[in-house]
Amino acid sequence: MNSTWLEGGKESLLHAHLPALVEGLTWVEAGIDLFAITVMLIGVLRFVANFLRAERAGDKRIAAIDDSRIELGRYILAGLELFIVSDIIETALSLQLLDLVFLGLLVAIRSAISYFLEREVANIRTGRTGPDPAA
């Protein structure tokens, strides 16, 4: 294992020989982060609009709110997946062991959040429609 990789702070071969590529990928990473934030914000705005509409839905209020929660969950999951892609690019560019460990922890946490969010969405669907006969 390369000691430069472990120590960090020193320039890698990628940075030394392909600085334009590193710069470009850094911008791509920033763009993915901004897009992930935008996706989540769109989800929140749609949730608020749907929630306010659902409050006036009368008898169908609970089902409408559940639909809104399912939709918000999809936006959150999409944003989290984009953040993971961005983190992978950042780690690949840094080539530092600490960043790799941090990436592993982030992916584990975001995967756990995704798993439990998907379970909650499935529970909402099951609660409304009954158990899935295919399952």
Image (cartoon, rainbow, N blue to C red):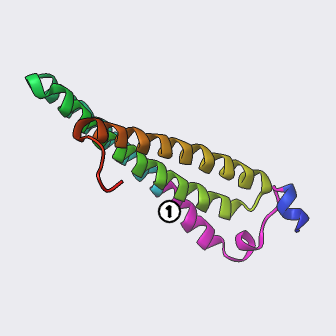
Specify whether residue 20 is painted magenta.
yes
Specify whether residue 66 is painted magenta.
no
Q: Say which residue appears at 45% left-offset and 56% top-offset.
A: 31
Q: Say which residue appears at 72% left-offset and 52% top-offset.
A: 99
- Where residue 33 appears, as percent x and y from the top left, is 48, 51
Would residue 20 be found to the left or right of residue 63 on screen?
A: right
Q: Say which residue appears at 77% left-offset and 51% top-offset.
A: 98
Q: Which residue is mark 1?
A: 28
Secondary structure category for the residue under label 1: helix
- Where residue 4 appears, as percent x and y from the top left, is 87, 63
Image: 124 above or below 74: above
Residue in front for this viewpoint, 100 or 37: 100
Image: 102 above or below 45: below
Q: Say which residue appears at 60% left-offset and 60% top-offset.
A: 88
Residue lying furthest bottom in this view? 17
- Where residue 97 appears, as percent x and y from the top left, is 79, 56
Which residues make up the magenta segment? 8-31
Residue in front for this viewpoint, 43 or 74: 74
- Where residue 44 appears, as percent x and y from the top left, is 31, 36
Q: Decide: few, some or many residues near mark 1? Use Cα within 10 Å; few <14, some 14-19, many ≥20.
A: some
Residue in front for this viewpoint, 6 or 123: 123
The quadrant where residue 86 appears: bottom right
Would residue 20 be found to the left or right of residue 83 on screen?
A: right
Given the image, on which type of amino acid does mark 1 rest? Answer: Val
Main secondary structure of the magenta stretch: helix
Image: 47 above or below 132: above
